[in-house]
Protein backbone atom coordinates (compact mmCIF):
# COMPACT_ATOMS: atom_id res chain seq x y z
CA UNK A 1 0.00 0.00 0.00
CA UNK A 2 1.40 3.44 -0.88
CA UNK A 3 2.62 5.78 1.80
CA UNK A 4 0.17 8.14 3.43
CA UNK A 5 2.07 11.25 2.39
CA UNK A 6 4.53 10.43 -0.39
CA UNK A 7 6.28 13.23 -2.25
CA UNK A 8 3.95 14.07 -5.09
CA UNK A 9 4.92 16.85 -7.50
CA UNK A 10 1.58 16.60 -9.27
CA UNK A 11 -0.77 16.95 -6.33
CA UNK A 12 1.29 19.13 -4.02
CA UNK A 13 0.43 22.80 -4.39
CA UNK A 14 4.16 23.50 -4.43
CA UNK A 15 7.28 21.42 -4.11
CA UNK A 16 9.17 23.72 -1.80
CA UNK A 17 8.16 26.09 0.97
CA UNK A 18 10.25 29.24 1.42
CA UNK A 19 12.13 29.28 4.69
CA UNK A 20 10.84 31.68 7.30
CA UNK A 21 14.27 33.25 7.74
CA UNK A 22 16.26 34.88 4.98
CA UNK A 23 13.47 35.09 2.40
CA UNK A 24 12.07 38.35 1.13
CA UNK A 25 8.40 38.68 2.23
CA UNK A 26 7.29 39.55 -1.29
CA UNK A 27 8.90 36.34 -2.55
CA UNK A 28 7.21 34.33 0.19
CA UNK A 29 3.88 35.92 -0.65
CA UNK A 30 4.32 35.20 -4.34
CA UNK A 31 5.15 31.58 -3.54
CA UNK A 32 2.02 31.23 -1.41
CA UNK A 33 -0.18 32.84 -4.06
CA UNK A 34 1.39 30.46 -6.56
CA UNK A 35 0.47 27.47 -4.38
CA UNK A 36 -3.10 28.71 -3.97
CA UNK A 37 -3.47 29.32 -7.69
CA UNK A 38 -1.93 25.99 -8.63
CA UNK A 39 -4.23 24.23 -6.19
CA UNK A 40 -7.18 26.10 -7.68
CA UNK A 41 -6.12 25.12 -11.20
CA UNK A 42 -5.90 21.47 -10.16
CA UNK A 43 -9.43 21.71 -8.81
CA UNK A 44 -10.52 23.52 -11.96
CA UNK A 45 -9.25 20.65 -14.10
CA UNK A 46 -12.22 18.52 -13.05
CA UNK A 47 -14.84 21.24 -13.30
CA UNK A 48 -16.03 20.30 -16.82
CA UNK A 49 -17.00 16.92 -15.40
CA UNK A 50 -18.82 18.29 -12.36
CA UNK A 51 -20.44 21.01 -14.47
CA UNK A 52 -21.79 18.39 -16.85
CA UNK A 53 -23.14 16.32 -13.95
CA UNK A 54 -24.72 19.35 -12.29
CA UNK A 55 -26.28 20.42 -15.59
CA UNK A 56 -27.75 16.99 -16.22
CA UNK A 57 -29.28 16.86 -12.74
CA UNK A 58 -30.61 20.40 -13.07
CA UNK A 59 -32.22 19.57 -16.41
CA UNK A 60 -33.74 16.19 -15.63
CA UNK A 61 -34.84 16.35 -11.99
CA UNK A 62 -37.70 18.82 -12.70
CA UNK A 63 -38.66 16.63 -15.67
CA UNK A 64 -38.70 13.33 -13.81
CA UNK A 65 -39.81 14.41 -10.32
CA UNK A 66 -42.87 16.53 -9.51
CA UNK A 67 -42.49 19.46 -7.14
CA UNK A 68 -44.19 17.66 -4.25
CA UNK A 69 -41.86 14.64 -4.40
CA UNK A 70 -38.88 16.91 -4.89
CA UNK A 71 -40.00 18.98 -1.93
CA UNK A 72 -40.24 15.88 0.28
CA UNK A 73 -36.78 14.77 -0.84
CA UNK A 74 -35.43 18.26 -0.14
CA UNK A 75 -36.85 18.34 3.39
CA UNK A 76 -35.36 14.90 4.18
CA UNK A 77 -31.93 15.80 2.80
CA UNK A 78 -31.97 19.20 4.50
CA UNK A 79 -32.79 17.62 7.86
CA UNK A 80 -30.04 15.02 7.49
CA UNK A 81 -27.61 17.73 6.41
CA UNK A 82 -28.34 19.84 9.47
CA UNK A 83 -27.91 16.82 11.74
CA UNK A 84 -24.69 15.95 9.91
CA UNK A 85 -23.33 19.44 10.47
CA UNK A 86 -23.82 18.93 14.21
CA UNK A 87 -22.37 15.41 14.15
CA UNK A 88 -19.23 16.63 12.37
CA UNK A 89 -18.27 18.61 15.51
CA UNK A 90 -16.20 20.92 13.29
CA UNK A 91 -13.56 18.19 13.13
CA UNK A 92 -12.96 18.26 9.31
CA UNK A 93 -11.73 21.87 9.43
CA UNK A 94 -9.48 21.13 12.40
CA UNK A 95 -8.20 18.00 10.67
CA UNK A 96 -7.27 19.95 7.52
CA UNK A 97 -5.35 22.54 9.50
CA UNK A 98 -3.67 19.93 11.71
CA UNK A 99 -2.55 17.71 8.83
CA UNK A 100 -1.26 20.73 6.89
CA UNK A 101 1.02 21.49 9.84
CA UNK A 102 1.81 17.85 10.84
CA UNK A 103 1.56 15.64 7.72
CA UNK A 104 3.60 12.90 9.39
CA UNK A 105 0.61 11.98 11.59
CA UNK A 106 -2.01 12.17 8.83
CA UNK A 107 -2.97 8.49 8.89
CA UNK A 108 -3.41 8.37 12.66
CA UNK A 109 -5.31 11.66 12.81
CA UNK A 110 -7.65 10.69 9.95
CA UNK A 111 -8.42 7.35 11.60
CA UNK A 112 -9.21 9.02 14.90
CA UNK A 113 -11.49 11.55 13.22
CA UNK A 114 -13.21 8.82 11.20
CA UNK A 115 -14.00 6.68 14.24
CA UNK A 116 -15.27 9.71 16.17
CA UNK A 117 -17.60 11.08 13.49
CA UNK A 118 -18.97 7.82 12.10
CA UNK A 119 -19.63 6.48 15.59
CA UNK A 120 -21.41 9.64 16.65
CA UNK A 121 -23.32 9.70 13.36
CA UNK A 122 -24.74 6.23 13.96
CA UNK A 123 -25.99 7.26 17.41
CA UNK A 124 -27.63 10.46 16.10
CA UNK A 125 -29.21 8.59 13.17
CA UNK A 126 -30.86 6.11 15.53
CA UNK A 127 -32.19 8.94 17.70
CA UNK A 128 -33.46 10.83 14.63
CA UNK A 129 -35.28 7.76 13.36
CA UNK A 130 -37.29 7.66 16.60
CA UNK A 131 -37.78 11.38 17.25
CA UNK A 132 -38.57 12.85 13.80
CA UNK A 133 -41.69 10.74 13.07
CA UNK A 134 -42.91 11.28 16.62
CA UNK A 135 -43.03 15.07 16.18
CA UNK A 136 -45.13 14.94 13.00
CA UNK A 137 -43.81 18.36 11.94
CA UNK A 138 -42.18 17.29 8.67
CA UNK A 139 -43.68 15.47 5.69
CA UNK A 140 -41.12 12.69 5.27
CA UNK A 141 -41.96 9.04 4.63
CA UNK A 142 -40.22 6.51 6.87
CA UNK A 143 -38.21 4.80 4.06
CA UNK A 144 -36.98 8.18 2.80
CA UNK A 145 -36.03 9.24 6.33
CA UNK A 146 -34.00 6.04 6.83
CA UNK A 147 -32.04 6.55 3.60
CA UNK A 148 -31.38 10.20 4.44
CA UNK A 149 -30.05 9.32 7.91
CA UNK A 150 -27.83 6.56 6.54
CA UNK A 151 -26.50 9.08 4.03
CA UNK A 152 -25.71 11.45 6.89
CA UNK A 153 -23.47 8.79 8.46
CA UNK A 154 -21.67 8.04 5.18
CA UNK A 155 -21.06 11.75 4.57
CA UNK A 156 -19.02 11.86 7.79
CA UNK A 157 -16.55 9.47 6.19
CA UNK A 158 -16.45 11.61 3.07
CA UNK A 159 -15.78 14.73 5.15
CA UNK A 160 -12.82 13.09 6.88
CA UNK A 161 -11.42 11.83 3.57
CA UNK A 162 -11.68 15.26 1.95
CA UNK A 163 -10.14 16.97 4.97
CA UNK A 164 -7.15 14.60 4.83
CA UNK A 165 -6.61 15.09 1.09
CA UNK A 166 -6.79 18.88 1.38
CA UNK A 167 -4.57 18.94 4.47
CA UNK A 168 -1.93 16.94 2.58
CA UNK A 169 -2.45 19.39 -0.30
CA UNK A 170 -3.26 16.54 -2.68
CA UNK A 171 -5.53 18.87 -4.61
CA UNK A 172 -5.51 16.77 -7.78
CA UNK A 173 -6.61 13.65 -5.91
CA UNK A 174 -9.23 15.64 -4.01
CA UNK A 175 -10.62 17.06 -7.24
CA UNK A 176 -10.72 13.79 -9.16
CA UNK A 177 -12.28 11.84 -6.30
CA UNK A 178 -15.12 14.35 -6.13
CA UNK A 179 -15.48 14.31 -9.90
CA UNK A 180 -15.77 10.51 -9.82
CA UNK A 181 -18.41 10.77 -7.12
CA UNK A 182 -20.40 13.31 -9.15
CA UNK A 183 -20.38 11.05 -12.20
CA UNK A 184 -21.49 7.97 -10.25
CA UNK A 185 -24.29 9.74 -8.39
CA UNK A 186 -25.56 11.46 -11.53
CA UNK A 187 -25.60 8.26 -13.59
CA UNK A 188 -27.33 6.17 -10.94
CA UNK A 189 -29.81 8.92 -10.01
CA UNK A 190 -30.95 9.55 -13.58
CA UNK A 191 -31.39 5.83 -14.21
CA UNK A 192 -33.40 5.39 -11.01
CA UNK A 193 -35.56 8.45 -11.68
CA UNK A 194 -36.12 7.31 -15.25
CA UNK A 195 -37.43 4.00 -13.91
CA UNK A 196 -39.86 5.83 -11.63
CA UNK A 197 -37.91 5.52 -8.38
CA UNK A 198 -39.37 8.72 -6.96
CA UNK A 199 -37.95 10.57 -3.97
CA UNK A 200 -36.90 7.38 -2.18
CA UNK A 201 -35.01 6.05 -5.20
CA UNK A 202 -33.40 9.44 -5.78
CA UNK A 203 -32.08 9.53 -2.22
CA UNK A 204 -30.84 5.93 -2.40
CA UNK A 205 -29.10 6.68 -5.70
CA UNK A 206 -26.90 9.19 -3.88
CA UNK A 207 -26.08 7.16 -0.78
CA UNK A 208 -24.92 3.92 -2.42
CA UNK A 209 -22.39 5.50 -4.85
CA UNK A 210 -21.18 7.76 -2.03
CA UNK A 211 -20.36 4.77 0.17
CA UNK A 212 -18.63 2.87 -2.64
CA UNK A 213 -16.55 5.82 -3.88
CA UNK A 214 -15.45 7.00 -0.43
CA UNK A 215 -14.30 3.50 0.56
CA UNK A 216 -12.57 2.98 -2.78
CA UNK A 217 -10.78 6.34 -2.77
CA UNK A 218 -9.66 5.88 0.83
CA UNK A 219 -7.98 2.61 -0.09
CA UNK A 220 -6.70 3.62 -3.54
CA UNK A 221 -4.95 6.81 -2.36
CA UNK A 222 -3.33 4.97 0.55
CA UNK A 223 -4.88 6.97 3.36
CA UNK A 224 -5.07 3.74 5.32
CA UNK A 225 -6.09 3.23 8.92
CA UNK A 226 -3.93 3.49 12.00
CA UNK A 227 -5.81 2.75 15.19
CA UNK A 228 -2.73 3.13 17.41
CA UNK A 229 -3.55 6.76 18.22
CA UNK A 230 -7.27 6.26 18.64
CA UNK A 231 -8.00 6.58 22.34
CA UNK A 232 -10.36 8.59 24.54
CA UNK A 233 -7.80 11.35 24.94
CA UNK A 234 -7.34 11.79 21.17
CA UNK A 235 -11.09 11.69 20.57
CA UNK A 236 -11.64 14.38 23.20
CA UNK A 237 -8.83 16.48 21.74
CA UNK A 238 -10.37 16.55 18.25
CA UNK A 239 -13.87 17.12 19.61
CA UNK A 240 -12.69 20.01 21.80
CA UNK A 241 -10.63 21.64 19.06
CA UNK A 242 -13.54 21.39 16.65
CA UNK A 243 -16.18 22.97 18.88
CA UNK A 244 -15.76 26.52 17.50
CA UNK A 245 -16.00 25.12 13.98
CA UNK A 246 -18.97 22.95 15.00
CA UNK A 247 -21.05 25.98 15.80
CA UNK A 248 -19.76 27.67 12.66
CA UNK A 249 -20.58 24.74 10.38
CA UNK A 250 -23.98 24.13 11.91
CA UNK A 251 -24.92 27.80 11.69
CA UNK A 252 -23.76 28.09 8.08
CA UNK A 253 -25.76 25.00 7.18
CA UNK A 254 -28.80 26.28 9.05
CA UNK A 255 -28.50 29.73 7.47
CA UNK A 256 -28.08 28.30 3.96
CA UNK A 257 -30.67 25.50 4.12
CA UNK A 258 -32.84 25.92 7.20
CA UNK A 259 -35.35 28.16 5.47
CA UNK A 260 -36.52 25.17 3.43
CA UNK A 261 -37.81 23.54 6.61
CA UNK A 262 -39.60 26.77 7.51
CA UNK A 263 -41.09 27.09 4.02
CA UNK A 264 -42.35 23.52 4.19
CA UNK A 265 -44.16 24.20 7.47
CA UNK A 266 -45.26 27.81 6.79
CA UNK A 267 -46.34 27.38 3.15
CA UNK A 268 -46.39 23.97 1.45
CA UNK A 269 -44.08 21.18 0.34
CA UNK A 270 -44.32 22.21 -3.34
CA UNK A 271 -42.74 25.57 -2.50
CA UNK A 272 -39.74 23.71 -1.13
CA UNK A 273 -39.37 21.98 -4.49
CA UNK A 274 -39.44 25.33 -6.32
CA UNK A 275 -36.90 26.77 -3.88
CA UNK A 276 -34.56 23.80 -4.38
CA UNK A 277 -34.75 24.10 -8.17
CA UNK A 278 -33.98 27.83 -7.96
CA UNK A 279 -31.03 27.18 -5.65
CA UNK A 280 -29.65 24.55 -8.01
CA UNK A 281 -29.37 27.23 -10.67
CA UNK A 282 -28.08 29.91 -8.33
CA UNK A 283 -25.29 27.78 -6.83
CA UNK A 284 -23.98 26.50 -10.17
CA UNK A 285 -21.01 28.90 -9.87
CA UNK A 286 -20.36 27.78 -6.27
CA UNK A 287 -17.21 26.10 -7.56
CA UNK A 288 -15.58 29.55 -7.82
CA UNK A 289 -15.16 30.31 -4.10
CA UNK A 290 -14.64 26.60 -3.44
CA UNK A 291 -11.74 26.52 -5.90
CA UNK A 292 -10.16 29.42 -4.06
CA UNK A 293 -10.80 28.66 -0.38
CA UNK A 294 -9.94 24.94 -0.57
CA UNK A 295 -6.21 25.52 -1.19
CA UNK A 296 -6.34 28.92 0.53
CA UNK A 297 -6.81 27.61 4.10
CA UNK A 298 -3.69 25.39 4.25
CA UNK A 299 -1.65 27.98 2.32
CA UNK A 300 -2.61 30.86 4.65
CA UNK A 301 -2.12 28.64 7.71
CA UNK A 302 1.55 28.33 6.75
CA UNK A 303 2.23 32.11 6.55
CA UNK A 304 0.18 33.50 9.44
CA UNK A 305 3.29 35.20 10.80
CA UNK A 306 3.96 37.13 7.58
CA UNK A 307 1.40 39.94 7.52
CA UNK A 308 2.36 41.29 4.09
CA UNK A 309 2.28 37.92 2.36
CA UNK A 310 -0.90 36.92 4.16
CA UNK A 311 -2.67 40.13 3.12
CA UNK A 312 -1.52 39.89 -0.50
CA UNK A 313 -2.68 36.29 -0.78
CA UNK A 314 -6.07 37.04 0.79
CA UNK A 315 -6.70 40.05 -1.45
CA UNK A 316 -5.79 38.04 -4.53
CA UNK A 317 -8.30 35.41 -3.53
CA UNK A 318 -10.90 38.16 -3.09
CA UNK A 319 -10.25 39.59 -6.56
CA UNK A 320 -10.46 36.26 -8.34
CA UNK A 321 -13.64 35.31 -6.50
CA UNK A 322 -15.31 38.65 -7.13
CA UNK A 323 -14.64 38.71 -10.88
CA UNK A 324 -16.04 35.26 -11.56
CA UNK A 325 -18.89 35.18 -9.01
CA UNK A 326 -20.28 38.57 -10.11
CA UNK A 327 -20.12 37.58 -13.77
CA UNK A 328 -21.86 34.26 -13.16
CA UNK A 329 -24.53 35.85 -10.95
CA UNK A 330 -25.23 38.59 -13.50
CA UNK A 331 -25.69 35.94 -16.19
CA UNK A 332 -28.15 33.98 -14.05
CA UNK A 333 -30.10 37.16 -13.28
CA UNK A 334 -30.41 37.98 -16.99
CA UNK A 335 -31.28 34.49 -18.24
CA UNK A 336 -33.54 33.28 -15.39
CA UNK A 337 -36.81 33.96 -17.30
CA UNK A 338 -35.97 31.43 -20.01
CA UNK A 339 -34.35 28.74 -17.83
CA UNK A 340 -37.48 26.56 -17.35
CA UNK A 341 -38.38 26.54 -21.05
CA UNK A 342 -34.83 26.04 -22.32
CA UNK A 343 -34.22 23.16 -19.91
CA UNK A 344 -37.63 21.61 -20.60
CA UNK A 345 -38.92 21.67 -17.02
CA UNK A 346 -42.51 20.90 -16.14
CA UNK A 347 -44.70 24.06 -16.22
CA UNK A 348 -45.14 24.05 -12.43
CA UNK A 349 -41.47 24.98 -12.01
CA UNK A 350 -42.01 28.37 -13.69
CA UNK A 351 -42.66 29.59 -10.14
CA UNK A 352 -38.92 29.25 -9.49
CA UNK A 353 -37.97 32.12 -11.85
CA UNK A 354 -38.49 35.07 -9.44
CA UNK A 355 -36.76 33.06 -6.72
CA UNK A 356 -33.69 32.67 -8.94
CA UNK A 357 -33.57 36.40 -9.66
CA UNK A 358 -33.62 37.34 -5.98
CA UNK A 359 -31.52 34.51 -4.57
CA UNK A 360 -28.71 35.09 -7.07
CA UNK A 361 -28.03 38.43 -5.38
CA UNK A 362 -26.70 36.65 -2.29
CA UNK A 363 -24.12 34.58 -4.15
CA UNK A 364 -21.33 37.18 -4.63
CA UNK A 365 -21.80 38.29 -1.02
CA UNK A 366 -21.50 34.72 0.26
CA UNK A 367 -18.51 33.99 -2.00
CA UNK A 368 -16.52 36.95 -0.70
CA UNK A 369 -17.48 36.07 2.89
CA UNK A 370 -16.08 32.58 2.32
CA UNK A 371 -12.71 34.04 1.30
CA UNK A 372 -12.53 36.46 4.22
CA UNK A 373 -13.80 33.80 6.62
CA UNK A 374 -11.01 31.47 5.48
CA UNK A 375 -8.51 34.18 6.38
CA UNK A 376 -9.98 34.46 9.87
CA UNK A 377 -9.88 30.67 10.30
CA UNK A 378 -6.22 30.58 9.27
CA UNK A 379 -5.52 33.26 11.88
CA UNK A 380 -7.27 31.16 14.53
CA UNK A 381 -9.99 33.79 14.99
CA UNK A 382 -12.85 31.36 14.52
CA UNK A 383 -14.62 32.39 17.75
CA UNK A 384 -15.29 35.94 16.59
CA UNK A 385 -16.16 34.57 13.18
CA UNK A 386 -18.72 32.39 14.93
CA UNK A 387 -20.26 35.43 16.64
CA UNK A 388 -20.60 37.15 13.26
CA UNK A 389 -22.34 34.07 11.90
CA UNK A 390 -24.68 34.01 14.89
CA UNK A 391 -25.66 37.63 14.23
CA UNK A 392 -26.29 37.01 10.53
CA UNK A 393 -28.30 33.86 11.21
CA UNK A 394 -30.36 35.54 13.93
CA UNK A 395 -31.17 38.42 11.60
CA UNK A 396 -32.19 36.04 8.82
CA UNK A 397 -34.74 34.13 10.90
CA UNK A 398 -36.00 37.14 12.82
CA UNK A 399 -36.85 38.68 9.44
CA UNK A 400 -38.04 35.44 7.84
CA UNK A 401 -40.95 34.78 10.21
CA UNK A 402 -42.79 38.02 9.33
CA UNK A 403 -41.38 38.30 5.78
CA UNK A 404 -43.02 35.11 4.48
CA UNK A 405 -46.62 36.02 5.40
CA UNK A 406 -46.08 39.65 4.37
CA UNK A 407 -44.75 38.61 0.95
CA UNK A 408 -47.70 36.23 0.61
CA UNK A 409 -50.17 39.05 1.33
CA UNK A 410 -48.48 41.77 -0.73
CA UNK A 411 -47.08 39.99 -3.80
CA UNK A 412 -48.65 36.55 -3.59
CA UNK A 413 -45.30 34.75 -3.21
CA UNK A 414 -44.21 34.06 0.36
CA UNK A 415 -40.98 32.37 -0.74
CA UNK A 416 -39.71 35.72 -2.07
CA UNK A 417 -39.82 37.03 1.48
CA UNK A 418 -37.46 34.26 2.53
CA UNK A 419 -35.21 35.02 -0.46
CA UNK A 420 -34.87 38.68 0.52
CA UNK A 421 -33.99 37.73 4.10
CA UNK A 422 -31.24 35.46 2.77
CA UNK A 423 -29.69 38.36 0.86
CA UNK A 424 -29.89 40.60 3.93
CA UNK A 425 -28.17 38.04 6.16
CA UNK A 426 -25.33 37.53 3.68
CA UNK A 427 -24.76 41.28 3.52
CA UNK A 428 -24.51 41.46 7.31
CA UNK A 429 -22.11 38.51 7.31
CA UNK A 430 -19.86 40.13 4.72
CA UNK A 431 -19.67 43.39 6.66
CA UNK A 432 -18.90 41.51 9.87
CA UNK A 433 -16.05 39.37 8.53
CA UNK A 434 -14.48 42.38 6.82
CA UNK A 435 -14.49 44.28 10.12
CA UNK A 436 -13.01 41.31 12.00
CA UNK A 437 -9.99 40.98 9.72
CA UNK A 438 -6.83 42.73 10.97
CA UNK A 439 -6.42 46.34 9.91
CA UNK A 440 -4.91 46.82 6.49
CA UNK A 441 -5.92 43.50 4.97
CA UNK A 442 -9.06 44.90 3.36
CA UNK A 443 -8.69 48.48 2.17
CA UNK A 444 -10.75 51.07 0.30
CA UNK A 445 -8.91 50.02 -2.84
CA UNK A 446 -10.23 46.50 -2.33
CA UNK A 447 -13.85 47.67 -2.32
CA UNK A 448 -13.30 50.05 -5.24
CA UNK A 449 -12.17 46.99 -7.17
CA UNK A 450 -15.48 45.31 -6.28
CA UNK A 451 -17.42 48.37 -7.47
CA UNK A 452 -15.67 48.22 -10.85
CA UNK A 453 -16.58 44.54 -11.19
CA UNK A 454 -20.21 45.33 -10.29
CA UNK A 455 -20.29 47.90 -13.10
CA UNK A 456 -19.15 45.19 -15.51
CA UNK A 457 -21.87 42.89 -14.15
CA UNK A 458 -24.53 45.54 -14.73
CA UNK A 459 -23.35 45.88 -18.33
CA UNK A 460 -23.68 42.11 -18.79
CA UNK A 461 -27.26 42.15 -17.51
CA UNK A 462 -28.23 45.11 -19.70
CA UNK A 463 -26.73 43.68 -22.90
CA UNK A 464 -28.03 40.14 -22.37
CA UNK A 465 -31.54 41.28 -21.41
CA UNK A 466 -31.77 43.51 -24.48
CA UNK A 467 -30.90 40.62 -26.82
CA UNK A 468 -32.74 37.84 -24.99
CA UNK A 469 -35.88 38.21 -27.09
CA UNK A 470 -33.83 37.94 -30.29
CA UNK A 471 -31.88 34.76 -29.56
CA UNK A 472 -30.52 33.55 -26.25
CA UNK A 473 -27.20 32.23 -27.71
CA UNK A 474 -26.57 35.69 -29.17
CA UNK A 475 -27.48 37.27 -25.84
CA UNK A 476 -25.07 34.96 -24.02
CA UNK A 477 -22.18 35.67 -26.37
CA UNK A 478 -22.75 39.42 -26.44
CA UNK A 479 -23.23 39.63 -22.67
CA UNK A 480 -20.04 37.67 -21.99
CA UNK A 481 -17.98 39.78 -24.37
CA UNK A 482 -19.44 42.97 -22.90
CA UNK A 483 -18.52 41.79 -19.38
CA UNK A 484 -14.92 41.02 -20.35
CA UNK A 485 -14.55 44.27 -22.28
CA UNK A 486 -15.88 46.29 -19.35
CA UNK A 487 -13.53 44.51 -16.93
CA UNK A 488 -10.58 45.60 -19.07
CA UNK A 489 -12.02 49.09 -19.54
CA UNK A 490 -12.39 49.72 -15.81
CA UNK A 491 -9.04 47.98 -15.16
CA UNK A 492 -10.50 45.27 -12.96
CA UNK A 493 -8.59 42.82 -15.14
CA UNK A 494 -5.29 43.70 -16.80
CA UNK A 495 -3.35 42.00 -19.60
CA UNK A 496 -0.69 41.08 -17.03
CA UNK A 497 -3.31 39.04 -15.15
CA UNK A 498 -4.05 36.99 -18.26
CA UNK A 499 -0.35 36.47 -18.92
CA UNK A 500 0.14 35.32 -15.33
CA UNK A 501 -2.78 32.88 -15.58
CA UNK A 502 -1.49 31.50 -18.88
CA UNK A 503 1.95 31.09 -17.33
CA UNK A 504 0.53 29.12 -14.39
CA UNK A 505 -1.42 26.87 -16.74
CA UNK A 506 1.65 26.18 -18.87
CA UNK A 507 3.78 25.50 -15.80
CA UNK A 508 1.16 23.07 -14.48
CA UNK A 509 1.04 21.23 -17.80
CA UNK A 510 4.84 21.02 -17.94
CA UNK A 511 4.97 19.57 -14.43
CA UNK A 512 2.31 17.02 -15.29
CA UNK A 513 4.19 16.02 -18.44
CA UNK A 514 7.46 15.80 -16.54
CA UNK A 515 5.88 13.67 -13.82
CA UNK A 516 4.32 11.41 -16.46
CA UNK A 517 7.66 10.95 -18.21
CA UNK A 518 9.28 10.17 -14.87
CA UNK A 519 6.67 7.51 -14.12
CA UNK A 520 7.19 5.95 -17.54
CA UNK A 521 10.96 5.93 -17.05
CA UNK A 522 10.64 4.14 -13.73
Image (cartoon, helix red, strand yellow):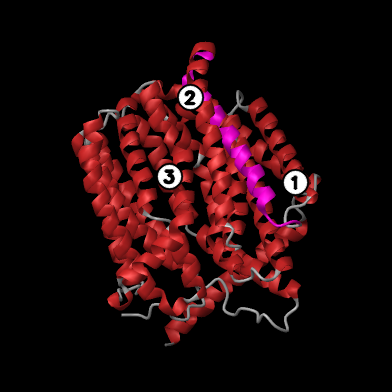
Kindly report the distance in space between the C-alpha atoms of the residues bearing marks 3 and 2. Answer: 32 Å
Q: Between disc 3 and disc 1, whose residue precedes?
A: 3
- The magenta-colored residue range is 411-439
Assess disc 3: are there few (<14), some (14-19) or many (≥20) residues with their C-alpha within 10 Å of its C-alpha. Answer: some
Report x, y in % for residue 57: 38, 40
Instruction: Give the labeled residue for mark 1.
Output: 447
Task: Say if 298 sits above or below 52 in the image.
Answer: below
Query: From this viewpoint, which residue is outermost toward the top?
Result: 409
Q: Are marks 3 and 2 in contact (CB under 8 Å)?
A: no
Taking the spot 35% from the left edge, 52% from the top edge, the residue there is 87
Q: Are marks 3 and 1 in contact (CB under 8 Å)?
A: no
The C terminus: image quadrant: bottom left
Instruction: Give the labeled residue for mark 2.
Output: 401
Q: Tell me, yes or no, whether the highlighted magenta stretch contains residue 300.
A: no
Report x, y in % for residue 136: 25, 28
Question: Residue 54, labelled with which disc?
Answer: 3
Q: Secondary structure at mark 2?
A: helix
Residue 260 in which image quadrant: top left
Q: Between disc 1 and disc 2, whose residue precedes?
A: 2
Task: Say if 513 sits above or below 95 in the image.
Answer: below
Amino acid sequence: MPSTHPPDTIDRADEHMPEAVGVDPSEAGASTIHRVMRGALLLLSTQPITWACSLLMTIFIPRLLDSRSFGEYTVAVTLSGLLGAVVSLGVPTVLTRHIASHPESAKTDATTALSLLVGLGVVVALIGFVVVPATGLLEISTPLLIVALVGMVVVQGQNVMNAALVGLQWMGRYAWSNALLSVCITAVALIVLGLGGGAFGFALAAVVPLLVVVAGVWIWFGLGLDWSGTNPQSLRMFATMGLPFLAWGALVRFRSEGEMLFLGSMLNIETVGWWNVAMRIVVIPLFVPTLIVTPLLPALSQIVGDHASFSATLRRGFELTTVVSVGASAAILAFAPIVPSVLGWAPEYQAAVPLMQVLVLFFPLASISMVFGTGLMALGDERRLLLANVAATALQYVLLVPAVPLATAWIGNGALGAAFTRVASEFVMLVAVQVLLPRGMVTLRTWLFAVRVLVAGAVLVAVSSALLSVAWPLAAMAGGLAYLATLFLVRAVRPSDLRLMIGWVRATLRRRQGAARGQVAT
